[in-house]
Amino acid sequence: MIMILYWILPVILFIIGLFCFVSNRKHLLSMLLTLEFIVLSLFLLLFIYLNLLNYENYFSMMFLTFSVCEGALGLSILVSMIRTHGNDYFQSFSIM
């Protein structure tokens, strides 16, 4: 019973993050923040999984490293978009 409680919180956080990501499409910055929230909930799930199975936490450090790289890439895209378009609205630029 107690092991089920460990899995509930990260799954609920992941579902809430997905719902926020799908429903909020106006600003790029808010979408990047919800993506970081999803990554942190996945990190919590991975950390709980590795601790319950008594594995090493080396893979969780690798996961954190790649999530930091993902965040830096997202912020650089945001800065580039603000410099070229003047704002971070998705409606202000086209795909082409």
Image (cartoon, rainbow, N blue to C red):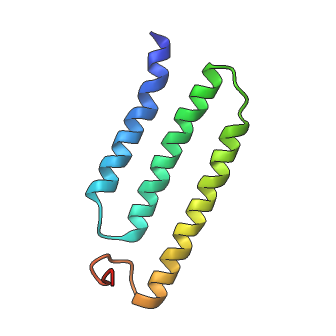
Taking the view exactly as shown, the residue that stands out farthest to the top is 1
Quadrant position of the C terminus in the picture: bottom left
Taking the view exactly as shown, the residue that stands out farthest to the front is 96
Classify residue 12 by image quadrant: top left
Classify residue 70 by image quadrant: bottom right
Does residue 11 sit above or below 84 in this rendering?
above
Q: Position of residue 64 (x, y in %)?
A: 64, 48
User: What residue lies at 48% left-to-right and 12% top-to-bottom?
Assistant: 2
Task: Give left or right: position of 56 versus 20.
Answer: right
Query: Closer to the camera, 58 or 23?
Result: 58
Number of labels in the image equals: 0
Does residue 53 sit above or below 66 in this rendering?
above
Q: Position of residue 48 (x, y in %)?
A: 57, 28
Q: Position of residue 35 (x, y in %)?
A: 45, 55
User: What residue lies at 67% left-to-right and 52% top-to-bottom?
Assistant: 65
Q: Position of residue 42 (x, y in %)?
A: 51, 40
User: What residue lies at 43% left-to-right and 30% top-to-bottom?
Assistant: 9
Does residue 83 sit above or below 41 in this rendering?
below
User: What residue lies at 62% left-to-right and 57% top-to-bottom?
Assistant: 68
Quadrant position of the N terminus in the picture: top left
Query: Closer to the camera, 75 or 59?
Result: 59
Query: Closer to the camera, 95 or 19?
Result: 95
Does residue 45 sit above or below 83 in this rendering?
above
Classify residue 34 by image quadrant: bottom left
